């Protein structure tokens, strides 16, 4: 009987960094650990390569000139094709707020620069998702190398062709990323320009895509979300009207009352009183 040997599965990592010197050091560490490596030089290119090549894990710098790591992470987590991929941020900043922002955007971990090779490898192995070999995985077994970076052994044109610019990510991914920004920032809503920047596009494109995907403008959606949150708070909590207005992102209790009555045909106080009267035993 012939026994067929199966090569061990080689994990595919996407490394996104625009600093050539730091990138070279990291690639040496990963190459020594026998990972297959894809390289991108900014967040938007990294997002495009993640969609095209389905890495098992992404190592990404936070601060990059063209599109930063936070923007790329928002798009990755909004896209069903890439939402499951663990993202580890690389940063030279010791800022707690920066680390918390990254974790809120969906990263699983942080590695501080300058990094210790043993720590980087330990964190990668901790977060690599378990996977059983499949036909596509079998094709990758034993193929550790580097792809997608000019001047490095093992370059392939396919990775270069996968690069995406700011107008190539699908509209539904842009809108999903924008929805996440709105829903997580109702109490302190960024401007439309800031939301567009955070998802790697511009106001005009986001406005058009948002209306096509949802049937309403960004500001109409914000109003609906705020009113929905206000209704839940009126129904489920004893918070006062002013506190609910603040929680839902209205500028004042008066502004909240006006918007609530315009949307639901009654004031917040009357709405709560009607709920209370329905709940009293007859």
Image (cartoon, grey):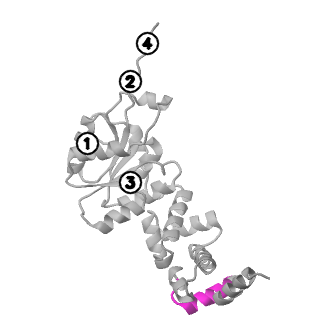
Of discs 1 and 2, which sits in the foreground?
2
Tell me, for residue 121, which label it has, or none. Answer: none
Q: CA distance from mark 1 to mark 4?
A: 35 Å
Q: Is 256 within the magenta?
A: yes
Q: Which residue is disc 3 drawn over?
A: 108
Viewed as shown, does residue 228 lie left or right of 184?
A: right
| Magenta-drawn segment | 250-263
* Image coords of residue 76 (percent x, y): 46, 54
> Circle 4 sits on which residue?
3
Q: Residue furthest bottom?
A: 254
Secondary structure under the numbered disc 4 in the rendered image: loop
Q: Single out the mark in the foreground, 3 or 2.
A: 3
Judging by the rendered image, the residue that carries numbered circle 2 is 7
Question: Label 3, label 2: how many angstroms apart (C-alpha)?
Answer: 29 Å
Comes first in the chain, label 3 or label 4 = 4
Disc 3 crowd rating (10 Å Cα; few below 14, some 14-19, many 20+) is some
* Alpha carbon separation for disc pair 1 and 2: 23 Å
Residue 78 in the image, given as x and y percentages of width and height: 50, 57
Q: Nearer the viewer, residue 32 or 15?
A: 32
Decide which of 205, 213 is in the foreground and name it.
Answer: 213
């Amino acid at each position: 009987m012939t026994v067929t040997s199966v090569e061990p599965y080689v994990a595919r990592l996407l490394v996104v960094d625009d600093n050539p010197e730091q990138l070279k050091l990291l690639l040496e560490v990963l190459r020594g650990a026998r990972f297959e490596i894809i390289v991108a030089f900014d967040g938007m290119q990294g997002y495009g390569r993640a969609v095209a090549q389905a890495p098992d894990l992404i190592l990404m710098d936070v601060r990059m000139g063209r599109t930063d790591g936070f923007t790329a992470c928002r798009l990755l987590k909004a896209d069903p094709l890439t939402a499951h991929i663990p993202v580890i941020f690389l940063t030279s900043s010791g800022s707690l707020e920066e680390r918390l922002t990254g974790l809120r955007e969906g990263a699983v971990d942080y590695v501080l620069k300058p990094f210790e090779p043993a720590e980087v490898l330990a964190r990668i192995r901790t977060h690599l998702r378990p996977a059983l070999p499949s036909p596509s995985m079998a094709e990758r077994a034993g193929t550790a190398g580097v792809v997608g970076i000019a001047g490095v052994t093992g370059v392939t044109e396919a990775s270069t062709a996968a690069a995406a610019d700011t107008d190539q990510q699908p509209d539904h991914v842009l809108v999903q990323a924008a929805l996440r920004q709105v829903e997580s920032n109702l109490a302190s809503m960024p401007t439309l320009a800031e939301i567009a920047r955070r998802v790697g596009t511009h106001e005009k494109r986001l406005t058009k895509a948002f209306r096509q995907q949802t049937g309403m403008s960004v500001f109409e959606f914000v109003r609906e979300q705020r009113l929905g949150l206000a209704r839940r708070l009126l129904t489920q909590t004893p918070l006062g009207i002013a506190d609910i207005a603040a929680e839902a992102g209205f500028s004042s209790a008066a502004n909240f009352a006006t918007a609530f009555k315009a949307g639901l045909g009654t004031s917040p106080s009357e709405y709560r009183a009607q709920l209370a009267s329905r709940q009293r035993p007859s």
